């Protein structure tokens, strides 16, 4: 029982830190010197990001997995992917930068044409705020959540009521 309690405490700590890092801002995300959308003036979270960002293997870049929230889009390793309400579909850009990217790393594209298995939404790529190619679904950039440790985890769902897992059709699941 002690082990489950410590895992719960760690999970709650990670979620609390993520909430701090992605509280959002009313400042224009394109302005300099002001907080970015999703960033915080708080020091960087004390959590360490995954040692290795999940990267697609020979399997499809995007696939569908059954979770406690229903069928959702995942990467090739089964890690849940999320969309951000502050992004604008089809804009060709991400609104997540700074501390936001620490808590919500982008799904980097391994090619101009990501492969899919079971995903019916329109898949594409943009240049993310980190300068790397980022995968999009229905024009929205896709992100991981630093609080998800294993395939099937959906700990980022509804964080700040602006982060959502996404269905195979590319629609956010609220």
Image: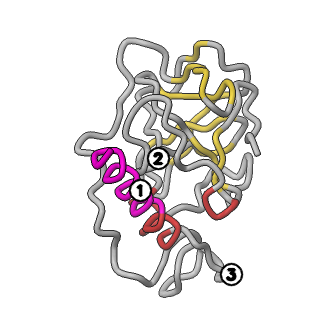
Disc 1/disc 3 C-alpha distance (Å): 22 Å
Residue at the disc numbered 3: 26
Q: Give the image location of residue 160, x and y in percent.
A: 64, 64
Quick one: label 1, few (<14), some, or many (20+) residues within 10 Å? some
Identify the magenta region: 1-15
Quick one: label 3, few (<14), some, or many (20+) residues within 10 Å? few
Query: Which residue is at 59% across, 62% downward?
Result: 95
First along the sequence among labels 3 and 2: 3
Element at label 2: loop
Q: Are marks 1 and 2 in contact (CB under 8 Å)?
A: yes
Quarter-wise, where is residue 44 in the image?
A: bottom left
Query: Which residue is at 73% across, 46% downward?
Result: 90
Q: Give the image location of residue 137, x and y in percent.
A: 66, 35
When the figure is inspected, residue 2 is found, relative to residue 125, above or below; the finding is below
Please tell me whether residue 13 belongs to the stretch shown in magenta. yes
Q: Are marks 3 and 2 in contact (CB under 8 Å)?
A: no
Q: Are marks 1 and 3 in contact (CB under 8 Å)?
A: no
Residue at the disc numbered 1: 130
Label for residue 106?
2
Please tell me whether residue 93 belongs to the stretch shown in magenta. no
Residue situated furthest front in the rendering: 1
Between 132 and 145, the residue placed more toward the observer is 145
Disc 3/disc 2 C-alpha distance (Å): 22 Å
Tell whether 50 sits left or right of 130: left
Q: How is the image coloured?
A: secondary structure
Q: Which of labels 1 and 3 is toward the front?
A: 3
């Amino acid at each position: 029982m002690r082990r489950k309690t410590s895992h719960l405490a760690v999970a709650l700590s990670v979620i609390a830190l993520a909430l701090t890092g992605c509280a959002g801002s009313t400042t224009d995300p394109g302005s300099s010197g002001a907080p970015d959308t999703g960033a915080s003036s708080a020091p960087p979270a004390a959590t360490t990001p995954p040692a290795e960002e999940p990267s697609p293997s020979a399997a499809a870049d995007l696939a569908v997995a059954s979770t406690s929230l229903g069928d959702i889009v995942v990467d090739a390793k089964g890690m849940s992917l999320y969309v951000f309400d502050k992004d604008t579909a089809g804009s060709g850009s991400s609104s997540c930068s700074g501390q936001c990217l620490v808590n919500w790393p982008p799904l980097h594209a391994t090619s101009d044409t990501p492969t899919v298995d079971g995903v019916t939404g329109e898949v594409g790529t943009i240049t993310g705020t980190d300068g790397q190619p980022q995968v999009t679904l229905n024009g929205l950039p896709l992100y991981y959540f630093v609080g998800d440790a294993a395939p099937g985890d959906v700990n980022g769902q509804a964080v700040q009521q602006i982060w959502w897992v996404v269905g195979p059709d590319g629609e956010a699941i609220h």
